[in-house]
Amino acid sequence: THFGFETVLEEEKAQKVYQVFENVAQKYDVMNDAMSLGIHRLWKDVLLHAMNPQPGARLLDVAGGTGDIAFRFLKYIESQEEKMRRREAKIMQTPSWQDISTSYAGEQDAVPQESKAVVCDINKEMLKVGKQKADSMGITTGLSWVVGDAEELPFGDNEFDIYTIAFGIRNVTHIEQALQEAQRVLKPGGRFMCLEFSKVSNPLLSKIYDAYSFQVIPVLGEVIAGDWKSYQYLVESIRKFPDQEEFKDMIDDAGFYCVRYHNLTGGIVALHSGFKL
Ligand code: SAM
């Protein structure tokens, strides 16, 4: 019925997205800071606090790009482990525990499985920048980088505790398909979490935000990355993405439970989450 036009358009979109991120990969992090005035860091921190991952957790970060979510995940878990060690040390110091601990010493605590983060992205240039970042941060364990499409994830069923996608899902051609894949790779009880640009409801903020997006962002793109078009695409893709409620319905329809969202910065960004049961 569509004489194949739809498929052509879809292929064009996928190619365009690939091109955009190939072009911007080297400047991606600098541009993120410039465009969002550094606020994207806070949005990502909020995601991690809402996630509150515990030692042993397995994360799949789809459209993970240069690794921001995975780095935060590993760092958060490290701080959790540090807290646990301190608490344990304190307990062991109390006199009544010293007697018990001697009889207890032979028994090793069950070693929790290693925490793991997998960054998956369709664009190897983005991953390359991420890997370089990991090297410079000295992160060597618990992290892997996989080229893959959100619509056809190269992972088995029920493998992950948490699936994240931050500022990635609006770039995916078939969102429903990506949600199905999220559902498949999560373990039962696993959580889906998505950060994405959304709809600003306050009319004044909306005006300012529009002016900023259409007039400032492409200029920044040109000045910093020498690439007006890629950043114009980014702004347009943000406007086309479903609003908070529509996207929530899509997640519901994919079969997730307890789906909800929180607006960040007046709805410029929304954090959606749901569980696989
Ligand atoms: N999550 C990172 C962050 O928050 O900084 C990167 C977000 S970046 C705006 C969007 C990423 O989505 C790009 O790295 C792009 O290559 C990736 N992407 C686009 N389409 C994809 C797809 N179908 N499957 C996997 N990744 C995709």
Image (tube, rainbow, N blue to C red):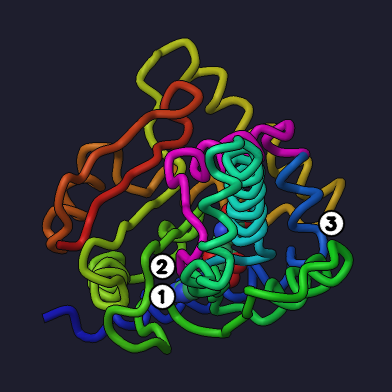
Q: Is any part of residue 160 visible from this angle?
A: yes
Q: Secondary structure at mark 2?
A: loop
Q: Earlier in the sequence, mark 1 or mark 2?
A: 1
Mark 3 C-beta closer than 8 Å to ligand 1: no
Residue at image mark 3: 226
Indicate whether 203 appears above or below 128.
above
The residue located at (53%, 78%) in the rendering is 15
- Specify the quadrant of the image occupied by residue 165: bottom left
Note whether ligand 1 is within 8 Å of mark 1.
Answer: yes
Which stretch did the figure color magenta? 34-62
**Decide: marks 3, 2 in contact (CB < 8 A)?**
no
Say whether marks 1 and 2 touch (CB < 8 Å).
yes
Which residue occupies the foreground of this view, 76 or 34? 76
Q: Quote the CA–CA distance across marks 3 and 1.
A: 28 Å
Judging by the rendered image, the residue that carries numbered circle 1 is: 150
Residue 58 at x, y percent in the picture: 46, 69
Q: Residue at x 65, y 54 (%)?
A: 78
Q: Is residue 276 left or right of residue 272?
A: left
Q: Residue furthest top?
A: 204
Q: As displayed, is residue 152 above or below residue 72?
A: below
Q: Is mark 2 within 8 Å of ligand 1?
A: yes
Residue 54 sits above or below residue 118 on the image:
above
According to the picture, the residue beneath numbered tag 2 turns out to be: 172
Q: CA distance from mark 1 to mark 2?
A: 7 Å
Task: Tell which of 202 and 231 is nearer to you.
Answer: 202
Left or right of residue 4: residue 23: right
